Amino acid sequence: MRGRHVRGNRIAVLVLTAGLGLAGCGGSDDGATPSVPTPPAATTGAPATGAPSAPASAAGSTVTADLSEFTITLSQKTFAPGTYTFVVRENGQTSHALAIKGPGVTEQTTTIQPGGAEQRMTVTLRAGTYELWCPVGNHKSRGMDLTITVA
Ligand SMILES: [Cu+2]
C-alpha cells in the first residue's frame, strides 16, 4: 500500500511539471519583445504599367494618431485596405513614438520628445489585423497598445 502511494505522488509531480512547462512555453510570447525595425520587403503596390503616375504624396488617406500618457488615439477606427499616412502627434509629458506591425508592414516613427514636431509614417495596409503601440520604455504594457482590423 505504501509503495503504491509513493508512486502515485511521483506521477502527480511529473504531470504537474509537464503542465508548467507547457504553460511556460505558451506564455513566452508575452512581454517585452524588442521591436525589430526590419525594412519592409518590396512594397506590393500598384504595378507601374507605364501610365503617368499620380503625384506621389497625394495617394492615401491621412490618419491622426495622438500620443499621451498612456494612450494612443486614432482619428479613425475602421480601415479599408489602402495606403495611409499616420500623422503622429506628441501630446504628452514624456517621449513617445508609434510602431505598427501587421501583414506586410513593420514600421515605426522616431521617438518624439514632448513638444516635438509631428512625425509622418506612410504604410500600405492589407486586409488583416495590425497592432499599433508605443515602443518607448514600458508604455506598451501601460496602455499604449491597440489593434486595428483592416477589412
Ligand atoms: Cu509612449
Image (tube, rainbow, N blue to C red):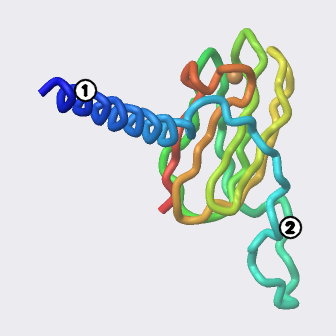
Q: How crowded is mark 1: few (under 14 residues within 10 Å), some or many (20 or more)?
A: few
Image quarter of residue 125: bottom right
Which residue matches tag 2? 55
Residue at 80%, 59% (x, y): give it. 40
Name the residue nearer the viewer: 143 or 72. 143
Name the residue nearer the viewer: 105 or 17. 17
Sequence-first disc among 1 and 2: 1
Image quarter of residue 91: top right
| Ligand 1 quarter of the rendering | top right
Q: Which amino acid does label 2 sit on?
A: Pro
Which residue matches tag 1? 6
Taking the view exactly as shown, the residue that stands out farthest to the top is 93
Q: What residue type is labelled 1?
A: Val
Which quarter of the rendered picture does the N terminus lie within?
top left
Q: How crowded is mark 2: few (under 14 residues within 10 Å), some or many (20 or more)?
A: few
With respect to residue 68, does 48 lie above or below? below
Name the residue nearer the viewer: 111 or 50. 111
Residue 50 appears left or right of 45 = right
Residue at 85%, 55% (x, y): give it. 39
Residue at 28%, 32% (x, y): give it. 12
The picture places residue 94, in percent across and down from the top left corner, at 75, 12
Residue at 66%, 49% (x, y): give it. 101
The picture places residue 78, in percent across and down from the top left corner, at 48, 50
Foreground tag (1 vs 2): 1
The picture places residue 144, in percent across and down from the top left corner, at 59, 26
The picture places residue 57, in percent across and down from the top left corner, at 83, 59
